[in-house]
Amino acid sequence: MEEGENIAGGMSYRTMDGIDSKRIMKYLDGLDDESYMKILEENKIYYIVSAEKTSARLNLTKKRVENGRLHTECAKMINTKIYTSLRWLEKLKEDIMSVKNKSEILELTQYRKWHAVKLLPSSAEGILITSSIKEKIEKLSVNPQIGPEKLEEAMIHIEKAEEIFFDLLNLSEKSDFNAAERSRIVGYSEAVLADKELESLIN
């Protein structure tokens, strides 16, 4: 199994670290041509449903962006990425349905691209969160009882989170997804720390 193939988790035995999938799939693909084709068709349905779930997740994010309070250019950039990803998923479903005689339905690059697409919603929503928290900081900074100097720690956290989420928006099939998954957790943790700093000042 190639390095970095632990992606798009749950869609294939290829995603299991250290497993030579070619050695085990022959035991799961059917004992004859008839059973093999039945299993292949069910496997294709499974992938199609998973792709549709990814599309639904992207559409939910699109609505959140449309109803959020992002700068116009930022919202436009995110929506363009979502639109491009939705079109790619439609093409992916066509590719899946066209598979005729192989148990490994997707190529490695498709798995990796799918992983990048699946990370797009949480990255975009992370930017929505950081934008809202930064707006909250701006409002509090004019409060004479708080002042900008008391908001420095919150600003440090939220700027770090924002930088991480913008970086994650630019993932591709060539990205290091293990590092991306770790960064996503750090980004949300930094946003939480910023919010806690603000709550401590308000309360």
Image (tube, rainbow, N blue to C red):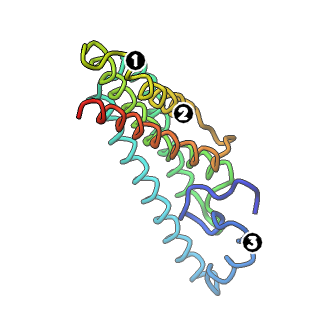
Q: Looking at the image, is 15 positioned above or below residue 169? A: below
Location of the N terminus (image quadrant) = bottom right
At mark 3, the secondary structure is loop
Marks 2 and 3, the one that precedes in the sequence: 3
Q: Which mark is residue 173?
A: none
Q: Looking at the image, is 116 positioned above or below residue 53? A: above
Disc 2 crowd, CA 10 A, few/some/many (<14, 14-19, 20+): many
Of tags 3 and 1, the one toward the viewer is: 1
Residue annotated with mark 2: 164
Marks 3 and 1, the one that precedes in the sequence: 3
Residue annotated with mark 3: 20
Location of the C terminus (image quadrant) = top left
The spot of residue 44 in percent (x, y) is 51, 64
Disc 1 crowd, CA 10 A, few/some/many (<14, 14-19, 20+): few
Q: Nearer the viewer, residue 22 or 133?
A: 133
Task: Tell me if 104 is positioned left or right of 148 in this view.
Answer: right
The spot of residue 25 in percent (x, y) is 67, 76
Q: Nearer the viewer, residue 202 or 91?
A: 202
Q: Residue at x 62, y 81 (%)?
A: 28
- Distance, label 2 to label 3, CA atoms, is 34 Å
Task: Tell me if 182 is positioned left or right of 75 in this view.
Answer: right
Residue annotated with mark 1: 149
